[in-house]
Image: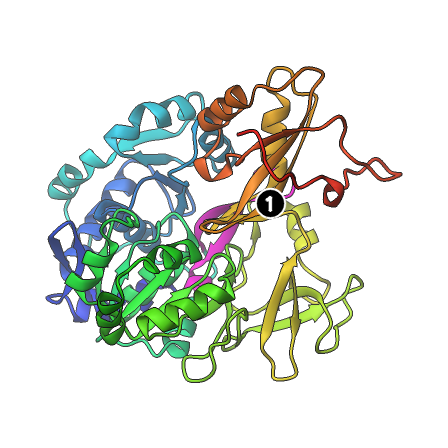
Amino acid sequence: MNLPNLFAPSLKQAADAPGLEFNGEVFTFGRLDEDSDRLAAWLLSLGVEPGDRVAVYLKNSPSLVLIYLAAVKAGLIFTPINILYRRDEIAHILADAEPKIVFADPESQDLVASAIAGSGSRLLLTSEIEQAIARTQRPATLPAPADDDVAALVYTSGTTGRPKGAMLTQANFAANALNLIEAWRMTADDRLLLTLPLFHVHGLGNGLHTWLALGYRLRLTERFRKETIVDELLDFRPTVFFGVPTMYERLLETPREVAREIGGSLRLFVSGSAPLPAATHRKFEDLFGSVILERYGMSETLMNSGNPHDGERRPGSVGLPLPNISIRICDETDAEAVNGQTGELQIKGPNVFSGYWRQDSATKEAFTADGFFRSGDLGMRGDDGYITLQGRGKELIISGGFNVYPREIEEFLAKQPGVSEAAVVGVPDPLKGERPLAFIVSSNPIDADALGAACREGLASFKNPTAFVQVAALPRNALGKVQKHLLPRPQSTSS
């Protein structure tokens, strides 16, 4: 199934129903449908063709939603860019994806313009969208995308430190939405408060798609704000909330009587994008009277497994495979491990992406001979089928729900004055789950303040090391590979 067909019952048959709230403004499904049709026609009139990329560097907003809808209706490839990325990070994605159009807010215009320089992409501002919609006639038809057409190019860092574009098809997104609707008992009567960023598949793949498939009411916020989240929950009275562990840690600060009031009307709290500490799971149940449903997904696969809606939601576990998804746990030879044995999670199903953009070798390496995707995540399966994650075979750090690959930070630090070598590891953090910690080899005493300032200027905030530790040398094995597990974990650090 393609996305226009999945969304049609909501956009066309429920045209008069209120669909989207944002900053007090309400959009009906019919308005979203017509405005996105007009926006799609405008983009096509600019010379954009099916299969071309349309990139966005945008905070959550109705404009972002309309751009996404226009793209999937016209067979364009939506390419979201993390709003925390800075110039070099943006420039890499633009050079790799080669989008015809890049949308930005006026406040980000200068940053994106500097990243676009020489790329051949055209910069458009969200301030132009309203006028473009008003002056463009609604088209009678739009190019019909095929189920296996790429709908979105989602960039996820690789072990080389340079982001790779995961090609997610129309059918991938549709299968994921239908799985979640079934598994989480979602209906048109639900109400979702969505504070997750739409540049991430958690907000985009789970939030927007289940909403548009069912036609329930959605309140979108620009971002999660700990200062206002409780007021939003009390005012909107959602029945469903999707969050990352950091958000649930913040919600533990809610007064008990208020938490119980929120928990009384909100039937489903879902957590993902990073491991949810078992202690947080239990504290939240005690405070809100609600048991969080933890699930497991990736940019390349969308959602893979989850604790059951009707059944035990086990702290520390990511539950059971979702419908139509196979998850096996294998050793280094790809032989299946027995229950209770640790191995790599390998995944197959209609949710799994079609490959990495323009990286055939990386795509080939990512799949087994019989078509399972190698997740790089380590876990074990119990005799009752529940899966528990036990770390990552790769060096991925997950900080506040964002993927961070040490190599990218290491390469950045190695370019800084006086730095001979750098190694980055993840260390526990009570709010973010993990934070990067950098070990620096330098012939002179390091200037932690200067290194921190350089990182803040050149890297997204979630990639900034929490501290810099100077060491005489990096520990290596006989083949010269850095053995990060031998690096000291200091009691105090320079930051």
Task: Name the element at disc 1.
Answer: strand
Q: Residues within 10 Å of mark 1 (few under 14, many from 20)?
A: many
Image height of 203 relative to 436, above or below: below
Disc 1 marks which residue?
Answer: 426
* Residue in the foreground of this view, choosing between 247 and 78: 247
Image location of residue 201, percent across then percent down: 42, 55
Residue drawn where x is 56% and y is 29% of the image: 494
Task: Specify whether 33 is left or right of 408.
Answer: left
Task: Specify whether 458 is left or right of 44.
Answer: right
Residue drawn where x is 30% and y is 27% of the image: 109
* Residue in the foreground of this view, choosing between 435 and 287: 287
Task: Specify whether 348 is left or right of 462.
Answer: right
Residue drawn where x is 59% and y is 36% of the image: 492
The residue type indicated by label 1 comes to: Gly
Q: Main secondary structure of the magenta part?
A: strand
Q: Which residues are magenta?
A: 150-174
Image location of residue 54, percent across then percent down: 37, 41
